[in-house]
Amino acid sequence: MNTLGGADVTAYVAMRQGEKAANGTINRELGVLGKMLRCAYRQNKLTRVPTFSYLKEAAPRQGFFELEQFEAVRRELPEDLRVVVTIAHTYGWRVPSEVLTLERRQLDLAAGTLRLDPGATKNGDGRVVYLTPELKALLTAQVARVEALQRQLGRIIRWLFPHLTASCQHAECTRGHGHVGERRHRMTKVWRTAVRAAGVPGRIAHDFRRTAVRNLERQGVSRSAP
């Protein structure tokens, strides 16, 4: 590490760019390197900390969903994923890491609440939200779909948003094995199809997070509110 210099960092950046890594990704990696070097310097493991420059990153996305756009996309999705995007649109939760990871125990229909466990969110804090009447009805129907699948497969399904149908045509999938009943990790293909059909190609699910924050601010609710 004592021999590491700016030329080495420049060579690393060129290598990562050759691998098609985004500038933001490379900057995060350089940030980790810089933190390691500073830590080593404070522990007297280095005599100097080399300096290096960061790359220019693309401006943050500013995409928002207007209500009619959201409803147009939602109509193009399967029933279970309509529930997913409604949660994201209402509360600003991240789809892959906060909504699709939900387990049935985190939903309390009697109390009308949905919660994220501590450690499940980006900042590590837990979160509890009260269901809107629309979401309570949608989640009640989703639980019924999961329970029907449980009876079909003859086993307990802990996930709130499992694969309800086979994602392939292999015999093991159509017999109820494979992905059926397992947690859905992503919805990339069906999402792309839906946004194209809704006339808003290129939109991403993370736009729901910005939309929810904007809607809360319009209602006079603090950004820090759950």
Image (cartoon, rainbow, N blue to C red):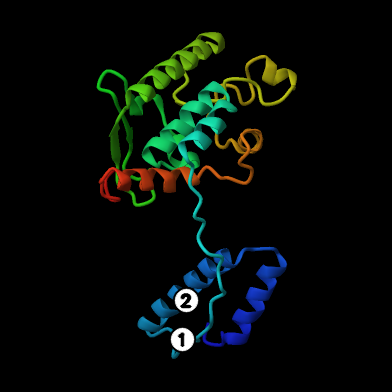
Mark toward the start of the polypeptide (2 vs 1): 2
- On screen, residue 6 versus residue 216, left or right, reads right
The disc placed on residue 34 is 2
Q: Amino acid at mark 1?
A: Val
Is residue 213 or residue 93 the one in the foreground?
A: 213
- On screen, residue 139 versus residue 206, left or right, reads left
Camera sees residue 48: yes
Q: Secondary structure at mark 2?
A: helix
Q: Secondary structure at mark 1?
A: loop
Callout 2–callout 1 Cβ contact below 8 Å? yes
Residue most extreme to the right: 170
Q: Amino acid at mark 2?
A: Gly
Camera sees residue 161: no
Is residue 35 or residue 196 the one in the foreground?
A: 196
In which image quadrant can residue 44 be found? bottom left
The residue sitting at 43% across, 37% down in the picture is 89
Q: Residues within 10 Å of mark 1 (few under 14, many from 20)?
A: some
Q: Position of residue 162 (x, y in %)?
A: 52, 25
Q: Which residue is mark 1?
A: 49
Q: Is residue 110 above or below residue 89?
A: above
Q: Position of residue 123 (x, y in %)?
A: 34, 52
Q: Position of residue 13 (x, y in %)?
A: 63, 74
Is residue 124 or residue 84 the one in the foreground?
A: 84
